[in-house]
Image (cartoon, helix red, strand yellow):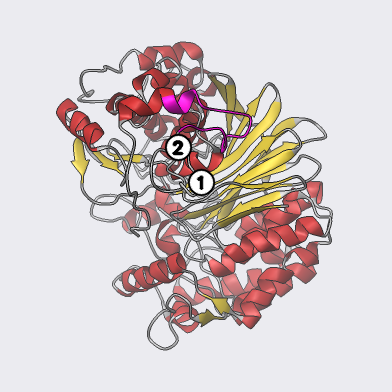
Amino acid sequence: MRRRTFLAALPAAAAGPALAGSRAENPDRNRPDVRPGDRIDGATFASRSAAWGTHGAAATAHPLATLAALDMLRAGGSAVDAAIAANAVLGYGESTACGIGGDCFVLLWDPKTRKVVGLNGSGRSPRGLSLEAVRARATPKGLIPSHGAISVSTPGCVDAWWTLHGRYGRLPWKDLLQPAIRACEEGTPVVQNQAFYLEASNRSFSKNPAIEELDNFRKVWAPDGRTPREGEVFRNPALGRTYRLIAEGGGRAFYEGEIAETLERYFRRIGGWMTRADLAAHRTEWVEPRSVRYRDTDVWALPANTQGYVTLQMLAMLDRFDLRGMGFQSAQAIHHGVEAKRLAFEDRARFYADPAFYEQPIDWLLSADYAAERARLIRPDRILDTVFPGRAPTQGDTTYLTTADADGMMVSIIQSNYRGMGSGLMPDGLGFMLQNRGELFALADGHPNVYAPGKRPFQTIIPGFATRGGEPWLSFGVMGGGMQPQGQAQVISNLVDFGLGVQEAGDAPRWHHDGGTEPTGEDMGQPGVLNLETGTPETTKAALAKLGWTLKPAPGVYGGYQAIQRWPGRWAAATEMRKDGVALAY
């Protein structure tokens, strides 16, 4: 959607020193380039001011989800309670991006242990589906289809919530789903992005012969032959009933009770592979996040099977260049960022896969020596014609939300059904769609990410987190497939290099590069295409074209940002102008 239009932009040469030198204790004040009411126009690139509070905060992609999170915090709940309540509401109100048929990942600041904690809530492929059967259903390009039963992996979302609540929850489990249940049963007006992408999904599904059945989707989302328009009241009582089963039976009710039985019967009916045994075997895992130092900031990410380390690899390379001196929104700053992305993404295509099946060379990928080696390949005066992965030593659709509570806990959570709302398949009477993460397996022998039964596919969804001096500083994310590490690196640079505030850092124009090799083995071409969002200075566009970049006129995919920034004794929450969300604090 073309949600974002800027009225003006500072010249790149003037922006860098002005922005970097004007940071004060409160980033939204004492700025020589900011006037009262100056939000979109001028150098701030901000659609609104940050939301400030002392007791807690929440930022999500839907107003009702943010309100649900605040309700939990005000009732004495933890940031985890608030995040679960918000995510459940998003499964109703932003079902084009997320839901309990998908996976979930979390980075969390634990104020008791004073550590960043990681959680992998992704599911595995069906154990009864062989590599040979998958290859027999591959596309002409040798890829797994985007939709249909062949693309479905076990949903990990509900067990991730259950696992989080078991360690960090304060309120009763059943209370967390009540806001979502009310919304499903009573109905609420459909927000703009949801209406837009529902209509697009309906068109896409209707033309896709790989989807075994569409009746259940149409019963819920298009009973009158069309999907709901913006502002029309929508109800999903089937999802409300599913939420009630989970609320009363606990998180494992999704995997071992009536819901699991319904899922198995559904796949037997349409000809799929997921079984109750696949669901019962699923367990969430606590994982150890890693970090790299970028200037004075430690940026954290989850390990594989996510692409989280791509952000760290990009920043480790960019730490060796003076982006502030190059200037905010300058051609040189963008050029160096894109080249770092290309280098890191080739490693992503070669080395990122389920660690239970492949030993990723993590220490080497995140080492200072390797970052320096890769950074030396970046030239300021030309584009790298061809980019390859490093030589290791031997050995699209998502929601992001963040919450914080009065005790100092910060939750960075990302959850998704993946591409185009998911697989197109909705189990009988349950009211939610199943993800199509299985599309992201490779099919070539010897590839670390090659399909195997019971294996987790490569995952694009990654929460973000940053600390300073051992203290929590930023819980953030930029949803949207391969845009996520690109967007995360840009947000961190906007904050650290150019002194932007937490809202400005997300609203500033972004770039998005397409090209190179994918973890599925698909070759998207080199050097690829560079998308520049509205608001990028014309002088910057001209300079990038002169360097040789192909600039795509299409709007591109620039992601969706939410963030909470910690300040002494208070929180600043920001949301995304490209989505329908709200940030609130109290």
| Extent of the magenta region | 18-32
User: Considering only vertical position in the picture, is 360 above or below 583?
Assistant: above
Q: Which residue is mark 1?
A: 36
Residue 122 horizontal/vertical position (percent): 58, 49
The secondary element bearing badge 2 is classed as: helix
Name the kind of residue labelled 2 in the image: Pro
Determine the main secondary structure of the stretch shown in magenta: loop
Name which residue lies at 41% across and 48% down: 40
Q: Which mark is residue 485?
A: 2
Relative to residue 284, is residue 576 drawn left or right?
left
Which of discs 1 and 2 lies nearer the camera? The answer is 1
Name the kind of residue labelled 1 in the image: Pro
Relative to residue 515, is residue 304 drawn left or right?
right
Q: Which of the 4 image quadrants contains residue 33?
A: top left
Disc 1 and disc 2 in contact, CB within 8 angstroms: no
Instruction: Give the CA separation, mark 1 to mark 2.
Output: 33 Å
In this view, the residue in front, 367 or 295, is 295
Q: Which mark is residue 549?
A: none
Relative to residue 450, is residue 570 drawn left or right?
right
* Label 1: how many Cα within 10 Å (few below 14, some 14–19, many 20+): few
The secondary element bearing badge 1 is classed as: loop
Q: In what quadrant of the picture does the N terminus appear?
A: bottom left
Name which residue lies at 46% across and 29% down: 493
* Label 2: how many Cα within 10 Å (few below 14, some 14–19, many 20+): many
Q: Which of the 4 image quadrants contains residue 544?
A: top left
Residue 30 within the magenta-colored segment of the rendering: yes
Name which residue lies at 47% across and 21% down: 316
In this view, the residue in front, 202 or 259, is 202
Residue 529 horizontal/vertical position (percent): 23, 39
Residue 116 within the magenta-colored segment of the rendering: no
